[in-house]
Image (cartoon, rainbow, N blue to C red):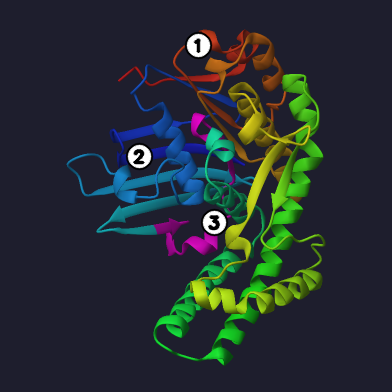
């Protein structure tokens, strides 16, 4: 899978910008503020239909304008594809192969893996950021995941509304509560199962990669669920959830909120069983996220039999030469990679000789 071209109109600081990419390694070079990260953001937006930097689409519109358009040409399975997204009047309209379509119909068509400085929030940030990470990755990998998660969110919103009605309005509709609870259990069991499979897939790769780039061993991801689930077989999960929902029914009504489920999941990055969020240095945290991203490549290849587009935004500036070289060996010739840097001297000479260099300082 490759992106061949991206066109940005009124997107961030670009009035109009067209960039073409080679199939292999592409290096975006330029001073701070010229738009290197914006190009990465644009590619990611085409893939996930959201920005890695903001949840507000208005933030993406160039100042003193009221719309943006972003489009791209993709090669996938030796076939050319086109995607275009218009944002105007608070609404995003998506076109795939020149036909208007819905987000859920194309969410896994373009696959990207991104590493940027903000990825440290995967460790240092709040649980919601790690849940969002799982949702984005699984939506790209598993056809039904996006639908499952959207259904779950609607059911959760309805169930929380009903719990408030029971507590504050005296509505005693326990039959509806039971129906919503069973539907939450059903969708949640599949989400738990898929998240567990994905985390286990990452754990098969991440420790060896982390050891290779850092010299430290025993890194793994720990999946933290509420309630605690030991066996991730679908029917066993459902049984566990039913038992816990029954136990906490009065408490949920009293608090007027759903207290257990996949909306309370979290992940811990553990080095030798110690949580890196609490005990890891910033260097260990950075390298563990790099190892995670490199593990993602292998998982994508194994599950989807395809190579994603690798986006590396300002990764090399804070790594020493030895760690740069270890990272570079994971960038295979057959995976399209787009790297940003302020200085070409930050990039290994061997990489430079075969890379397509795009200078954004040039008008």
* Cβ atoms at labels 3 and 1 below 8 Å apart: no
- Residue picked out by circle 1: 344
Q: Is residue 102 left or right of residue 15?
A: right
Q: Check residue 193 for magenta coloring.
A: no
Q: Which dot, 2 or 1, sits closer to the camera? A: 1
User: In 3D space, how far apart are the residues under numbered discs 3 and 1 (Cα atoms)?
Assistant: 34 Å
Q: Is residue 335 visible?
A: no
Magenta segment, which residues?
Answer: 94-119
Rendered location of residue 167, percent (x, y):
45, 81
Q: Residue at x 46, y 64 (%)?
A: 102
Q: Residue at x 25, y 40 (%)?
A: 62
Image quadrant where residue 247 sits: bottom right
Secondary element at tag 1 = helix
| Residue sitting nearer the eye, 252 or 333 | 252
- Residue picked out by circle 2: 8
Which of pointers 2 and 3 lies earlier in the amino acid sequence? 2
Image quadrant where residue 333 sits: top right
Dot 2, crowdedness within 10 Å: few (<14), some or many (≥20)?
many
Image quarter hosting the N terminus: top right
Q: Check residue 107 for magenta coloring.
A: yes
* Cβ atoms at labels 2 and 1 below 8 Å apart: no
| Residue sitting nearer the eye, 163 or 83 | 163
* Cβ atoms at labels 2 and 3 below 8 Å apart: no
Dot 1, crowdedness within 10 Å: few (<14), some or many (≥20)?
some
Q: Is residue 104 above or below residue 286?
A: below
Secondary element at tag 3 = loop
User: In 3D space, how far apart are the residues under numbered discs 2 and 3 (Cα atoms)?
Assistant: 20 Å
**Number of on-image labels:** 3
Rendered location of residue 295, percent (x, y):
72, 37
Q: Is residue 218 above or below residue 69?
A: above
- Residue picked out by circle 3: 107
Q: Is residue 340 above or below residue 242?
A: above
């Amino acid at each position: 899978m490759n992106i061949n071209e991206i066109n940005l109109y009124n997107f961030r600081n670009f009035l109009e910008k067209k960039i073409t990419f080679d199939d292999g390694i592409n290096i975006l070079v330029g001073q701070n503020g010229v738009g290197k990260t914006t190009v990465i953001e644009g590619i990611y937006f085409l893939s996930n239909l959201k920005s890695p930097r903001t949840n507000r689409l208005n933030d993406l519109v160039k100042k003193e304008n009221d719309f943006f358009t972003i489009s791209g040409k993709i090669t996938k399975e030796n076939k050319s594809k086109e995607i275009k997204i218009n944002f105007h009047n608070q609404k995003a309209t998506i076109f795939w192969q020149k036909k208007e379509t819905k987000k859920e119909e194309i969410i896994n068509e373009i696959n990207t893996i991104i590493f940027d400085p903000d990825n440290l929030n995967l460790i240092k940030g709040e649980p919601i950021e790690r849940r969002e990470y799982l949702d984005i990755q699984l939506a790209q990998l598993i056809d039904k995941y996006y639908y499952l998660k959207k259904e779950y969110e609607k059911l959760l919103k309805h169930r929380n509304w009903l719990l408030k009605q029971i507590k504050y309005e005296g509505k005693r509709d326990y039959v509806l509560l039971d129906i919503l609870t069973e539907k939450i259990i059903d969708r949640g069991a599949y989400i738990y199962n898929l998240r567990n499979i994905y985390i286990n897939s990452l754990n098969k790769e991440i420790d060896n990669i982390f050891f290779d780039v850092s010299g430290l061993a025993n890194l793994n991801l720990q999946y933290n669920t509420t309630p605690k689930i030991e066996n991730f077989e679908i029917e066993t999960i459902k049984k566990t959830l039913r038992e816990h929902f029954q136990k906490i029914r009065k408490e949920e009504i009293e608090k007027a909120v759903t207290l257990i489920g996949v909306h309370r999941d979290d992940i811990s990055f553990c080095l030798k069983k110690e949580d890196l969020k609490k005990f890891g240095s910033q260097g260990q945290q950075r390298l563990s996220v790099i190892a995670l991203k490199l593990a993602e490549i292998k998982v994508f290849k194994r599950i989807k039999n395809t190579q994603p587009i690798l986006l590396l935004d300002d990764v090399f500036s804070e790594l020493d030469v030895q760690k740069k070289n270890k990272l570079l060996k994971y960038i295979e010739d057959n995976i399209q990679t787009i790297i940003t840097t302020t200085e070409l001297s930050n990039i290994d000479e061997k990489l430079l000789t075969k890379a397509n260099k795009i200078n954004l300082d040039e008008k």
